[in-house]
Image: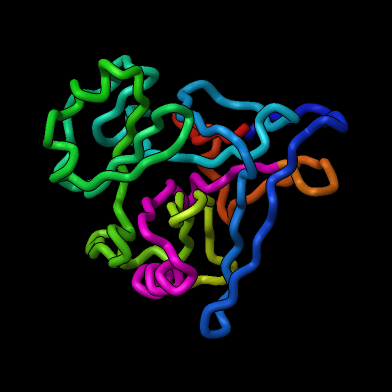
Amino acid sequence: MLASVGVNILAKPIQLKSYSVKGVRLTGYLPVDQQVYWVRSRPICHSGQSLIVPAAFTHPDMSIAGASIEWGKVVNPTISADLSGFCLIRDKKPWVLNLSQMKVGGLRKWEQFGTSVFQQDLLVQDGRRVPIAHAAALNWWRALVIFPNRFEVVENDVKMRRDDFQAALLKIGAQQAIYLDMGTWSEGAYISPQNRVVKIGKLRQNTRRQTNWLVFH
């Protein structure tokens, strides 16, 4: 389980957003004027960490799927051909690249800048959906979404197919979007406008096995 501690009155809450696309509702978690980090130590949701969500996939042997860098230190140098996108954390802000973009300079280019990188399924690239054949059977979705003027974490409130989720992201203006681990690994948490820790995620059976997270504060 994700740990939580008492929240003080100085906590900066996440701004909740509600989207409706053709009768289907999505929830957005908007970190206002906040920074983002990729971490491999289990985080605690409190006044200094206002949103926590699982990030990259975890293999059965507890290793992280795909290439990854943490604060400029390479964790896994092998780029997976099965995962089409990369989330970069540079200057405490997220960026999304595809495989072709990452090959220009490779991981070493980002290692020298102290960047954090993890690999995941790309959902939207340059305002267009990206096919993900192996994920077609999934029906709960969460994504880090880059808009022209902000970034948010967005998830569906009711079960929906991958292509419908992608279409909904495009309707609300997503320019880039990368998947965040869900399924039975979906437990996250945020600080509510009422200054309380609220857990999110529909299925949580593998929470204890999760190995990496995005943390906003």
Which color scheme is applied? rainbow
For the point 37% across and 41% down, which residue is it? Answer: 95
Left or right: where 167 falls relative to 23: left
Considering only vertical position in the picture, is 28 above or below 74?
A: below
Q: Which residues are magenta?
A: 161-190
Considering only vertical position in the picture, is 23 above or below 87?
A: below
Tell me residue 126's x, y (percent): 28, 59
Considering only vertical position in the picture, is 29 above or below 39?
A: below
For the point 52% across and 33% down, which residue is it? Answer: 36
Tell me residue 35's x, y (percent): 55, 32
For the point 37% across and 51% down, which residue is it? Answer: 178
Of residues 48 and 61, the one nearer the viewer is 48
Please identify the quarter of the rendering in which residue 88 is found: top left
Left or right: where 199 falls relative to 122: right
Tell me residue 204's x, y (percent): 57, 47
**Any magenta on residue 176?**
yes
**Any magenta on residue 192?**
no
For the point 74% across and 37% down, which residue is it? Answer: 12
Of residues 11 and 59, the one nearer the viewer is 11
> Which quadrant: the N terminus?
top right
Please identify the quarter of the rendering in which residue 17 is found: bottom right
Of residues 184 and 13, the one nearer the viewer is 13
> Which quadrant: the C terminus?
top right
* Number of numbered discs on residues: 0
Tell me residue 206's x, y (percent): 50, 41
Left or right: where 122 falls relative to 3: left
Please identify the quarter of the rendering in which residue 19 is found: bottom right
